[in-house]
Amino acid sequence: MSSELLQQAKSAKDVAAAEALYNQILAAPVSSNQTEAQLKEGLEIQEEALLRLGELYRDQKNAEGIAQVIFKSRAFMSSTAKAKTAKLIRTLLDYFNPIPSSTAIQISVLKDNIEWAASEKRIFLKQSLQLRLASIYLSTQSHKAALSLIDSLLAELRRLDDKLVLTELHLLESRVYRAIGNFPKSKASLTSSRTAANSIYCPPHLQCQLDLQSGILHAEDKDYTTAYSYFFEAFENLSNQGAEAEGKALEALKYMLLCKIMLNLPEDVTALLSVKLATKFSQVKDVESMRAVARAHQKRNLADFEKALKVYKDELSSDETIRSHLAALYDTLLEQNLLRIVEPYSVVEVEYVAKVVGQERQAVELKLSQMILDKVLHGVLDQGRGCLVLYDEQAEHVSLPSFHLFSIVNLRPHIHSILYIFRKFDQMSLRCRLRLPACWSRIRRHSWSPFTSLLHQFIRYLLTLST
């Protein structure tokens, strides 16, 4: 009877009719008078009905419906093997993925099922669901909740010595620490994950995730060559795992292209995309975005770089790794353009520099200030005139002994006069600071502060000569 209902539900054109038939199959009680073969067949039909009903709700984007299916599956799970139970519930939970804005329902369903698994003493299922919940916390940037759950789960797993789940959990912990910017702890967690993985057979998909995380952390250390080797290894393995791993394979390929760009080898991007495994991704928009960035970087063209960031905003901004490294690359490209523009001048207007580079004046002024502080650029910003004053690098390093070129001995009789002038200058600067605090902040940004410092040193030097 159940098999007939299942066939009717499969062939039903009306969604509501199919839904009613699947629910009828799930509501049918399992008779104790059935033979073992009949019982097995009945459970298989119920399992298929659960999955089909879940698919139906997934296609309709009905997250509440999937939650109800998972709740109904408990009766089935109570009478089947624990390993099969875990696989079934994972499959049903995966049906949430294509449904937008279903995260809150997923968290609620997971918490409810974790409690149920704990009450039923299904330890493996509980741990699997907790691991999934921690992963969702990471995706929603609930890092504190994720770490709290991971810590409690780690304590439990160390007692059980489940190396496979420990590998997955330490890997997740590494991702959480990386997301909050704690790279030392992220590396330590990844090392723990690899240590656990080395003592067991590590499934290929998990090994690929370890390689991806290793590449990401090496890229954070600016070791793009080593990062590229990890990404290439992950890309090769993921490409051999079929259609279900294509998303991760594309992610690894994007990271490989990123490494080539960051290594100042944008011309290698075209050659890399001609490799057999990469050709099927060559027309994908994610890859097109990286190709556009590579072209802009090769030309050192800031306008093209900005255009690529705008046109492919979703592809380049959705991934934290790519976003952070491209931000650093943009900063470097801006710096190179500014150096090229100001190089021929000794004095140049900031407004003119901003116009040539195609940026707002405030952003250019801020970047020039940073470059001066980092000693990339030798000069000062004259904000009164709105100019950048440049000087030779050697002029910055004038040492006091060079003052012997001037006959300092002849200045000895005038030391007291110099000291008097200096004290007056100090008093004037103090009054200016007290009376005109707004102006003083501007004055300090001119050459007064370096002059005062140099004058202090010069006076001290003269005093030593007079004693």
Image (cartoon, rainbow, N blue to C red):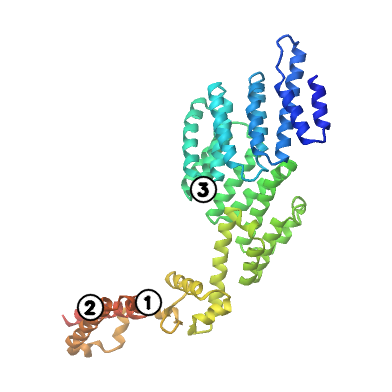
- Residue type at mark 2: give it: Arg
Q: CA gap, disc 3 to disc 1?
A: 38 Å
Q: Report which residue position mark 1 lands on.
A: 445
Percent coordinates x, y for residue 141 in the rendering: 52, 46
Determine if residue 215 is in view. Answer: yes
Q: Report which residue position mark 2 lands on.
A: 460
Does label 2 or label 3 sit earlier along the sequence? 3
In depth, the one of 92 and 244 nearer the eye is 92
- Residue type at mark 3: give it: Arg
Q: Secondary structure at mark 2?
A: helix
Percent coordinates x, y for residue 270 in the rendering: 73, 61
- Residue type at mark 1: give it: Arg
Q: Where the N terminus falls, by quadrant?
A: top right
| Picture residue at 54% right of the left edge, 62% below the top | 328
Give the crowd class for mark 1: few <14, some 14-19, many >=20 residues within 10 Å: some
Mark 1 vs mark 2, foreground winner is 1
Give the side of residue 168 with respect to residue 88, left or right: left
Give the residue at the far top of this rendering. 33
Percent coordinates x, y for residue 57 in the rendering: 70, 37
Q: Report which residue position mark 3 lands on.
A: 178
